[in-house]
Image: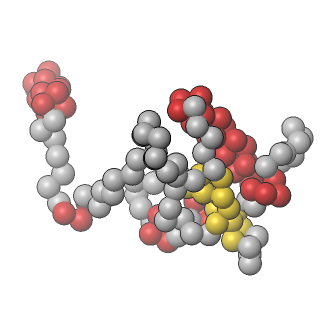
Amino acid sequence: MKKYLLILCAAFIATGSLQLHSKELKPKQVDFVAFQPAADFQLPSITLQYDPSTKAGANWEDLKNPKWSDTGEAIMLVRATIYLKDGLKRMTGKDFPVVSSNDLSKGIVLTLLKNASEDIRKDPEV
């Protein structure tokens, strides 16, 4: 029985036939292009979550050059941003801009789960 189940699962995966049929389980897909080699392509920013009123997240301008001994959640976000920025530059040859903002609807967003909006925190896929 296990052998047939394994073969059946492999067949579904190979043919792409395994799909969710419940509408509430399907997330709304939004097209997002991080890079195109066209000269007129506007690079998306790397958005580092920061709320100036509560100081939640990390302010890129204040923390973009951390010392090796710096620690904390904000520094963790900044180091992740530096790593991502470097990787994108190596892959594309382009220097992606970094902004600190509490608007998490644009760009490539980095945030801590506790600072994310409620719909993101409650999303089981996250």
Q: Quarter of the image for the C terminus: give it.
A: bottom left
* Residue 103 occupies quadrant: bottom right
Answer yes or no: is residue 85 visible: yes
Residue 16 x %, y %? 16, 35
Between 35 and 20, the one nearer to me in the picture: 35
Tell me: residue 99, above or below residue 37: below
Between 19 and 31, the one nearer to me in the picture: 31
* Left or right placement of residue 67 versus residue 120 in this view: right
Q: How many marks?
A: 0
Residue 66 x %, y %? 84, 45
Q: Residue at x 39, y 51 (%)?
A: 32
Tell me: residue 113, above or below residue 89: below
Q: Residue at x 62, y 69 (%)?
A: 102
Q: Residue at x 12, y 31 (%)?
A: 15
Tell me: residue 79, above or below residue 44: above
* Residue 73 occupies quadrant: bottom right
* Left or right placement of residue 20 versus residue 94 in this view: left
